[in-house]
Amino acid sequence: MLKGLAITPPVIGRISIGRVVEKNGKRLPEKSDEFQLTSQVQNRDGWVLHPLDEALRQANGGAKLRAIPVRVLFNDPELNLRAEFSMFDRETGRPICVGNGETCKRVTNEGVMSLPCPSPDACQYSNGYCKPYGRLNVVMGEEDELGSFIFRTTSFNSIRTVAARLRYFSAVSGGLLSTMPLELKLRGKSTTRSYRSAIYYVDILVQSGLTLEQAIGRARELDSQRKASGFDQAALDEAARLGFGNGAFEESGEDVPAVVEEFYPEADGVPEPSVESGNGVVPASLKDKLARKAATVTGGAP
């Protein structure tokens, strides 16, 4: 296998709670209050919807898609959700520094080096461009047991909530995370930074209509069926672990430009302060921009 190429779960679709729109000649992320399932194909209007999007909406009576049934691929929570602090090159779109708050892998003139990672707030190298970045792979439908939909986010709320839930479900089920019947659910909250307007983030729960005990029971039943058929979940987890470890960075050159466009917008070459949204960031409010402008004139801090 090619060294330096991360072997990641096969992706057959995307899950988003927003889209990229063009405003004043700039392409910026726009938040939403529902899920959208897309294929991996884009046209002039954006990402083409996946057939599952319409199927789930019909099953939901045409209402907004705020919960979707899923399973995860692996028993190890950290294989399903990978999250790091990430910084991308603005010209090539490639990752140049990825860290976990303790150590990082950074592209230098001498190649990729392992260096201390002080986290974005304390890192002078990041210059405001480094953000938390998480990728969650989930299975939807029965058509492809090893194909996944990917949800990408820079939301602290989504990353922290999903990471906690996956660990808890793994613990209470005795490590049977991959057979638990789960669902992604969209939640809203307001913060002082959002000026009382709702921001949305993703949570992961047991499927609607099931208690936690019932979900664990179903997980055990499916696990027994898989073992009887010869399905080796431990080997699958190990194969994924080795695949992720085969590359310095998870994102490929083909994926990164779309990631940068959606989650790392710029205005006049300067990164915009932003409030948190489940689909990435929302451009700073007019109040923030005026405060920064006043600070520039007076020499003070906003």
Image (tube, rainbow, N blue to C red):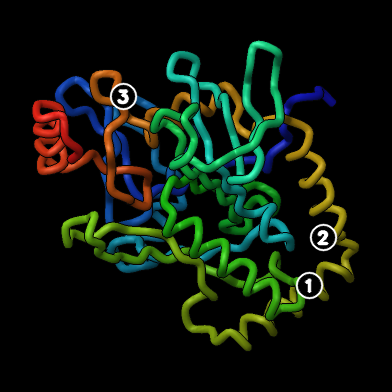
For label 3, the residue is 44
Question: How many residues crowd around disc 2 within 10 Å: few (fewer than 14), some, or many (20 or more)?
Answer: some
Q: Residue at x 45, y 58 (%)?
A: 158
Q: Residue at x 69, y 52 (%)?
A: 79
In what element is the residue under mark 1?
helix
Q: Are marks 1 and 2 in contact (CB under 8 Å)?
A: yes
Q: Earlier in the sequence, mark 1 or mark 3?
A: 3
Quarter location, residue 289 = top left
Reading the chain from its start, which is encountered first: label 3 or label 2? Answer: 3
Q: Quadrant of residue 228?
A: bottom right
Q: Is residue 165 above or below residue 11?
A: below
Percent x, y of residue 218:
68, 80
Residue 14 in picture, x, y percent from top left: 48, 44
**Residue at screen point 56% across, 67% down:** 164
The answer to whether residue 252 is above or below residue 282 is above
Q: Amino acid at mark 1?
A: Asp
Q: Residue 117's spot in the image, x, y percent? A: 60, 39
Question: Which residue corresponds to mark 2?
Answer: 233
Q: CA distance from mark 3 to mark 2?
A: 41 Å
Q: Nearer the viewer, residue 121 or 93?
A: 121
How crowded is the residue under tag 3: few (<14 C-alpha within 10 Å), some, or many (20+)? Answer: few
- The span from disc 1 to disc 3 (Cα, nearest Å) is 44 Å
* Type of the residue with mark 2: Gln
Q: For mark 1, what is the residue?
A: 223
Instruction: Examine the image and state in which quarter residue 211 appears.
Output: bottom right
Disc 2 is placed on an element classified as helix
